[in-house]
Image (cartoon, grey):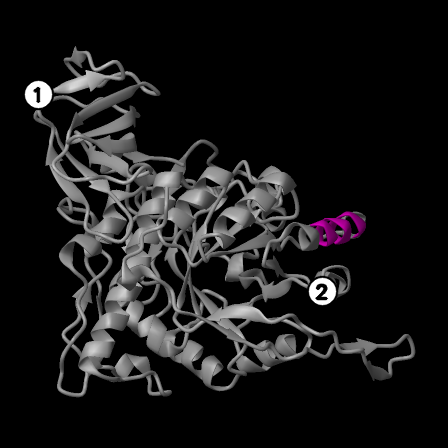
Amino acid sequence: MPQTTDGAMDATIGAVTANAAVANAVTANGTEAKAAAQAVPEIPRRRRPEVLAPAGNLTALKTAVDFGADAVYCSGKMFGMRSAPRNLTLEELEEGARYAHARGARVYVTCNILPTNSEVEGMTEYIGRLGEIGVDAIIVTDIGVMMAARKVAPNLEIHISTQAGVTNYLAANTLYELGARRVVLARELSLRDVAQIRRNTPDDLDIETFVHGSMCMAFSGRCLISNFMTGRSGNHGECAQPCRWRYSVVEEKRPGQYFPVEQTKDGAYIFNSQDMNMLDHVGDVIEAGASSLKIEGRAKSAYYVAAMTNAYKTAVSEYLAWREEHGPVTGEWNGADDAAAGGSGAPVGGRPGKRSGDANDAPAVVPEVSRTADGEEFRLPHWLHDEPFKVSHRDYCTGFWYRQVPAAQNVDRGGYYRDWIVVGDVHGWSDGRVSFVGRNKIVPGQHIEILQPGREPLELEVADDIRDDQGVPVAEANHPTRVFSLPCPEPIVPGAAMRTRALKRTLKAE
């Protein structure tokens, strides 16, 4: 599917010359020596915040690019922090890089496990291969891996993973001097923290921050609970997510008697963090100085990637257009305590149509600082605000971005909400009909939405005129993988997603 040509969705690309990085090598006797500076090739840099999307396979990678991602991060078959997704072979990574580059996007590969001695040689060889196939950057945690990568793949940008726990500008600057082009900041930082790091680091050091998706109760993802309970290492991409399990307390001399940690009959989810959702607050993140807005979800579906990439890319474009029209914003995170920021506030933690008795559905209020000097405030279109609730998700919060509204956990339930389901993948449009591959049942009278890049979803009531791939009328589209068509009043691009509201709310483990 071709990428949208809507001007609001196009990234402005500018080429600047990257500074040559000088690595500090430490000799065996402890004296420091300057390593020979390596010339870093000229790389196109974006003059606007990058929307960085996840991909667990080649289909998701292409979908992310099609729906507006400026860059995609993914993993090969080894050395990445997510082993659950299928991940990509070297051949798929090469194909994905070609696909992305042809559409103005970039590809980053995660090599961010904490390697043991037995893995060092293989990881170094793997990074060398990545340097040959055309990807743009590798994401690393270990400083030894970082220095080895500079030798075996000098053409690759080096991005420092959130697993490294960068929480201050001293660490960021040191990593920059060692050759890092980007730091992915720890998720525990506030807007004020990010702004201070941005002000005290070189302009050509990218600052990447998470804005959406699952959060981990452990600091920057460094957790040993899975190791202890299942033998699966969270630091090698094999986390069993025991933080999402339900727990009760058992007293030593009363075996079989379970005491809930919280006052529920089924126990409590004491480590079960909510998901992050900063879509309504992209302006704050941009004004804090983030170069790249990162969406979590390499284990999620291509539909999730499409919807969230489209939402954040559109939100960024909407905000930048608003700022261009109304002028500079006030409250531009200059170090003032974010807890003192004013504003009318906006609900972020709740869910539409919350059920009574759900304590975790109580909406939180955060300050609105994206406003002009005359008090004009930025607000997302309503349809865009709703997009995060149309993918699988836990209850939302704003992470640690706002100190007065800290991240929270669900202590009474686990799993994901799925209030919407995908019913078809669009093949194309011709003569007033949209053709699609069925995913779930579609019947006449049903209300569906069609999600396309860079625009509000098209709402459509299914007419009593569904046909199969031979043009024969059928009562309903009820066969997954088969092609059907139905009337549609306007052209639809191939690759668009067809979705509908689920008949009832579901809460499923994932």
Q: Which amino acid does label 1 sit on?
A: Asp
Is 370 above or below relative to 60?
below
Q: Could you tell me which quadrant the C terminus lies in? A: top left
The residue located at (55%, 45%) in the rendering is 82
Q: Tell whether position 381 is magenta.
A: no
Residue on which disc 1 sits: 464
Is disc 1 in contact with disc 2, using a CB cutoff of under 8 Å? no
Q: Tell whether position 125 is magenta.
A: yes
Provide the secondary structure element on which disc 2 rests: loop
The residue located at (43%, 53%) in the rendering is 53
Q: Which residue lies furthest to the front in this view?
A: 431
The quarter of the picture where residue 227 lies is top right
Residue on which disc 2 sits: 154
The quarter of the picture where residue 7 lies is bottom left
Give whichever of 3, 224 is nearer the camera. 3
- Magenta highlight range: 121-129
In the displayed structure image, the side of residue 191 where residue 101 appears, left or right? right
Give whichever of 5, 121 is nearer the camera. 5
Do we see residue 409 in this rendering?
A: no
Q: Position of residue 124 (x, y in %)?
A: 76, 54
In the displayed structure image, the side of residue 360 where residue 239 appears, left or right? right
